[in-house]
Image: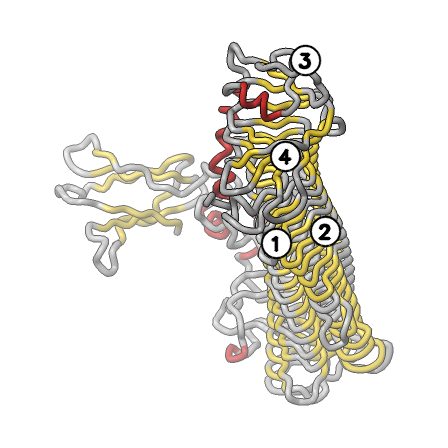
Amino acid sequence: MKEIGIMKTIQMMAGVAVLCLLTLRAGATTYFVNVSNTVPASPFATWTAAATNIQDAIDASTDGDLILVTNGLYATGGRVVYGSLTNRVVINKAVTVQSVNGPAKTFIQGYPSLGNSAVRCVYLTNNAALLGFTLTNGATRMTGDTYEEQSGGGIWCESTSAIVSNCVVAKNAARFFGGGTVSGTLKNSTLTNNTASLSTSQGGGALAGILTNCIIARNSAAFGGGAASNVLFNCTLTNNSANNSGGGAFSCVLSNCFLYGNSATNGGGAACGTLTGCTLTNNIAYNGGGSFSNTLNNCALIHNLATNSGGGAFSCTLSNCTLISNFATNYGGGAFACALSNCTLSGNSAFGSAVQSCGGGACFGMLYNCTLSNNASVHGGGTGSNTLNNCILFSNTASDGGGAFVAVLNSCILYSNTASFQGGGSYGGTLNACVINGNQSWQGGGGAENANLNDCLITHNFVTLSGASGTYYCNLTNCTVVGNATSSSIAAVGGNGSQTCANSIVYYNQYINVGGMIIINCCLSANSGVGYITNEPSFVNLDAGDYHLQSNSPCIDAGNNAYTNSITDLDGRPRVVNGTVDIGAYEYQGTNLEPFVVWLDQYGLPDDGSADYADSDGTGMKNWQKWIAGLNPTNRASVLAMLSPAATNKVTGLTVSWQSVNTRTYYLQRSTNLAASPAFSALQSNLVGQAGTTSYIDATATNRISYFYRVGVQ
């Protein structure tokens, strides 16, 4: 039994270089084959003495020889290699068999009936090569060894060191694996209309090979209609089908391939593999029209269809991919149950049952740093039941939840989304540190409805008929609700008395009516609640949309800590600065923040809080720490680092040095026992930094023991 799988394929790649050396060896002999020759004469060394069948020339050759075959149909003879299956041609030596005029003129034909009378087209041993043939009507037995006798109807290769180039493999059949080919390295070849027939079969076109610049079309199998367990480079897979998974490819590694018009139950384009730089378009499946359970990098999924879920992708991991205009009947027009990072989802849709259809862009998954736009569904035009981090959702549409439906959104931006019924920005779910701006709904919440919002900015949302322009039936904690409008006298926020609005600013909206909500320590333009204030919140620049608090804002230290749900504010900076939480989405950081913001701007880093705790140069220090230390956050060489202590020129003591700047003052600590608590004690403070390096002489380091030092910025 031969091993099947990608690992075998990869392990055998080294054989290609060996083949090149063998075929170019000195003293190689050329043999000739002409099916129409009337006077064949061994050793077939000229055209006039050419063999009439390919096998005779192979038998006369030795490793490294060349067999040239002229035009014709080679459909007689045969030989068994394994078990009882006959092969029309057995290339059992490391020779090259090459046609004179290519696959359009030269044919090797097997016998197409699966069973005892079946004849495979060609067998290739290690380091053999077959160039420029059409191989057709080959088949395998229905009994015997599943790999050796029931697989590889067209071509069966011992390993990927066997080369097949410029060939057409068409209308071959296998019972188990590889209707067209098994193993081998295929180049510039076409595999078409091959089948693997068993209900568990794999690789209608090819199995366990390495394919480069090949066309794989109209093949079929249960798994991997086009290919299974192959490595493919720059290949086109089109109109293949699988009864189960992977219409185009199953369990393959694909690079820069084009998968078009394939179909399967799961993964119309591909399933259970890895794809890099590929395009999947117009594929169809029940689940995962384009992709099912794959890892995709830098791929494009366009116009794929799922009759159930995951129009573009189902249960996949996607990085830096684009999902455009995919469709699902129920869940996840673009993606279902996927993990996506740095992806763009646009123009996808999910429409079917009003109860089921959800997530025009994505549904039931995890998204990081993604953009979702112009997607549509019944529930959740952009996304439904996902967790999203640092994503942007805009111009999505749905009946409920134009941007999102029952999702968890962290540090996301939702703008210009539309709900024809309720929840313009989001319906249901939890939103943390999000910006909800310019969304609209017919009724309910223009910005959000039935959701929990923490540290969010809700601004310039709109509702047409009834409900609340900003949020409706929502729980708000440390939110800022500003500039929301409506076409009639409807509240900016509202509920039925069971919702809570805590530590939030609700001001400068077209109408203000908190609708019987529980109000705790809020800044309102109306009298209501407990511990509320009605004075204006004193934003930094209301007209410019800067809703940070000025130093004289009555909202500073005016909240209730019992209702604080997070440790950071909308900027990602500390939520509680002076012991008591502020009211609103932004915590006043004090006068020390301004120099830090200027410093971030100086080095081209964002000053919205997203870079505060980032390690921009990969040195292990957060930007906030680098600012305190006076370092350059874009230069890996700019660090606060100890140098090795050195003996002084005096009789006793050590010289301790560290990298430093002349704009900081340092303190030095020492330890002789790191297991002690505390391990370090103060050695010297108020050490004025020098440009480049600062040193201190520890004159008390006189004993023959270990000394440990650490330095800090005062």
Residue at the right extreme, as displayed: 487
Say whether marks 1 and 3 touch (CB < 8 Å).
no
Eyeballing the image, is 189 above or below 493?
A: above
If you read the primary sequence from the N terminus, does the residue marked by circle 3 or circle 4 appear first? 3
User: Which residue is label 2 attached to?
Assistant: 262
User: Which residue is label 4 attached to?
Assistant: 212
Where disc 3 sits, the SS reads loop
Q: Position of residue 373 (x, y in %)?
A: 75, 58
Eyeballing the image, is 118 above or below 677?
A: above
User: Which residue is label 3 attached to?
Assistant: 47
Say whether marks 1 and 4 touch (CB < 8 Å).
no
What residue is drawn where x is 76% and y is 63%?
Answer: 349
Which amino acid, mark 3?
Trp
Q: Nearer the viewer, mark 3 or mark 4?
A: 3
Where disc 1 sits, the SS reads strand
The residues tagged by marks 1 and 4 sit, at their Cα atoms, a distance apart of: 21 Å
User: Which residue is label 1 attached to?
Assistant: 223
Dot 1 surroundings within 10 Å: few (below 14), some, or many (20 or more)?
Answer: many
Front in this rendered view, residue 307 or 587: 307
